Image (tube, rainbow, N blue to C red):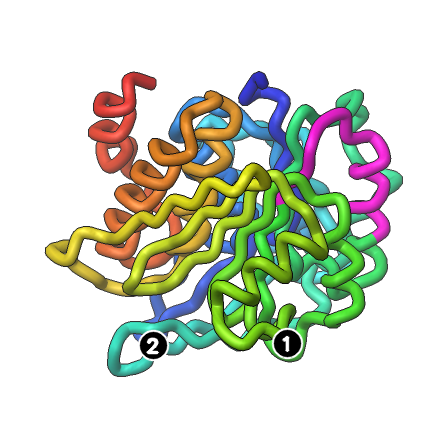
Amino acid sequence: MSGNGTCIFGEVLYDVFPDGQEVLGGAPFNVAWHAQAFGLSPQFISRVGSDAAGDRVIAAMHNWGMRLDGVQQDPGHPTGRVQVSLTADNEPAYTIVPDCAYDFIDSAALPANGGCELLYHGTLALRNPVSREALHALKRENSGGTFIDVNLRTPWWDRDAVIATLAGMRWIKLNNHELGLLVPDGNDMDEAIDLFMRRYAPELLIVTLGEAGALAVSGTGERVHAAPDRKHVVVDTVGAGDAFASVVLLGITRRWPLSLIMQRAQSFASAVVGMRGATVSDMAFYQRFLDGWEL
């Protein structure tokens, strides 16, 4: 599978922290940003406002070497923003502004790319019917599998819409709390995972477990658990799951064994939580992974 055939669809926004610092974010954007650093050159498909924030997004993408042909500009809706608050243990809470440009990704303005070998998206972009239709249009042109990263932010998700979207997904990632919301009839996590696998039959399910790491379950029954290094420093956990997903995406395209995917994904996510925000603009941060993984 060629990494250059990867399409990433969904929100791009600014995470605004309590001290006023603004960091580029949005789960799919974070994944695209990391994937670019790892050499995948994905096509990021989103929409920004015709405003100063949107100009900054486009400039940042250009400076990072990212493709811009999938980014639309919206004259009527602002670039996305999320107010981030942090609890005493550095866990983030989010106030997500509605009716942002990424809610209105236009199916008529999608790039004519002939389909994607791998399509990655989250669930937040499903909250608006305009962007939801654009995603469906992309899926109709998708020549490969789809990777969905479940991201349930109250009140911006609809259970029926998410359940319907899970059908036919080749790769699925969610956290243990989201697993409980989607499979409330499981008496414990193992039973919930078994029920989930029977209902949706993905090739791969990844359940992130916070401080306990992450668990991967394949359609063939293989299970791999990755635990974080207890010595890593935590500044905030914003974007940790996206960092993890970016390496899973990389591993899928590079056809790494599942155990290697999980080990490397956990290692990279542990490094990201030591930084402020979800994206890092210094390539030196990535170099030790590029060197160690021989990319």
Say which residue appears at 48% left-offset and 22% top-offset.
Answer: 255
The amino acid on which the numbered mark 2 sits, given as a three-letter code, is Leu
Up the image or down, 141 lies above or below 98; here it is above
Up the image or down, 241 lies above or below 152; here it is above
Say which residue appears at 28% left-offset and 17% top-offset.
Answer: 294
Q: Circles 1 and 2: CB distance less than 8 Å?
A: no
Q: Tell me the CA gap for discs 1 and 2.
A: 31 Å
Up the image or down, 70 lies above or below 73; here it is above
The magenta stretch spans which residues? 133-147
Q: Find residue 35 and report its horizontal and vertical position in percent.
A: 46, 33
Point out which mark residue 176 bears.
none
Point out which mark residue 86 bears.
2
Q: Find residue 91 and report its horizontal and vertical position in percent.
A: 34, 73
Q: Find residue 14 and report its horizontal and vertical position in percent.
A: 49, 59
| Tag 1 residue | 185
Q: Find residue 66 and report its horizontal and vertical position in percent.
A: 52, 30
